[in-house]
Amino acid sequence: MEHLLIPTVYWQQIIMTKDELLLLAETATTEDDQFDFKREFQPQKKAAFWVELIKDIVAFANTRGGAIVFGINDDGSLSDDNCEGLLSFDPAKLTDQINKYTGTQFSQFWITSVGRNGVFHPALIIEPTRIPMVFKKVGTYETDTAVQKTAFSLGTVYFRHGAKSEPATQDDLRSSFDRELRRVREEWLGSMRQIVEAPPGSTVTIAEPEEPISELRLSSDPNAPAVTIKNVSDTHPHRQKELIRKVRERVPGIGRFNSHDIQAVKCAEDINEETRPDFVHKPHELASPQYSEGFVDFICSQVEGNGLYLIGCREILKAARYGTDTSILG
């Protein structure tokens, strides 16, 4: 029998889920290949701030994802800088900065706040990219002492090596290739398994339906008939940033509403791809969730009907994470 061997380097590059990365952001005490502290969030410094941040975001995404917590010095102590501006920062502007230096519209990240020792800090949770990003533009800036510094060069690919973001090695590229190969293999095997596990004597036929489905209604009822959806992007068209934008447009007076609030609503209402497939869908394990217009309607109706709704959701999320006593939704 032929055995399939997975390279050892792959097992050293296990992908964390979003929840695991969030837990890492809340508990990690030292910087490593999936975690980093940032003393400040100062986008007004332009190149001096952006190129170093983009270098780390790209390195985390190329490696296997990671978390960056702001307002903390490299030694783990609290910084004197107020980084709350990140929580209201437009994620599209961050995507634009990544695109400026890589030519890639990378948006597989989310902005949230995490509690560490009773203090909340803004954080970036970065998901891994399937194909490593390459810098198409030199990242240079002038230091406070008027010295030109280069964070990354044209054509370089960066990965995380321990607590540093550094140019890729051959092992880095091999690991990235192995990870993507395994993801594709698992997708293929998932489809093949349905055929292999068919009862003896079964006949497998590939055919189009005699009559196309003209209307489809999604339901969380487990007894509802199962239907295969060919294009989920039609039923769940919104990524997280589009969901935030749609809710803000529908409810102009909502005030603060960001990725942390989406997680809070999902936690308070027990909404995920299993409990509410009509609201949330994930194409595969490493993919970002996609949301339906029905979820937009749900959030807007709850907020408009209860001015304290989001506050209640935030308290429930806080209690779920830290085990604190809190009030429930009214």
Image (cartoon, rainbow, N blue to C red):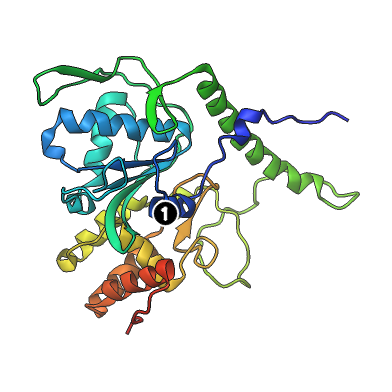
Residue 105 visible in the current orientation? no
| Residue 216 screen position, x and y as percent | 51, 62
Horizontal and vertical percent position of residue 264:
36, 66
**Mark 1 Cα shell of 10 Å, populated few (<14), some (14-19), many (≥20):** few
> Can residue 242 be seen at all in this image of the molecule?
yes
SS type, badge 1: helix
Amino acid carrying mark 1 in the image: Thr
Q: Nearer the viewer, residue 208 or 198?
A: 198
Q: Residue at x 36, y 69 (%)?
A: 318
> What is the residue that sits farthest to the right in this orientation?
201
Q: Toward which corner of the image does residue 165 lie, by quadrant?
A: top left
Q: Nearer the viewer, residue 103 or 152?
A: 152
Q: To which residue does mark 1 refer?
A: 27
188 sits left or right of 82 in the view: right
Q: Is 169 placed above or below 308 here?
A: above
Which residue is found at the position 53% from the left and 42% from the top?
15
Quadrant (top left, top right, bottom left, bottom right) of the N terminus:
top right
Name the image quarter holding the C terminus: bottom left
Does 158 appear above or below 297? above
Place of residue 182 in the rendered image (x, y in percent of width and height, measured from the top left): 63, 34
Residue farthest top in this picture: 154
- The quadrant in which residue 301 appears is bottom left
The residue sitting at 60% across, 59% down in the picture is 227
Q: Hey, which residue is sitting farthest bottom in the picture?
A: 330
x, y percentage for residue 119? Answer: 28, 61
Total label count?
A: 1
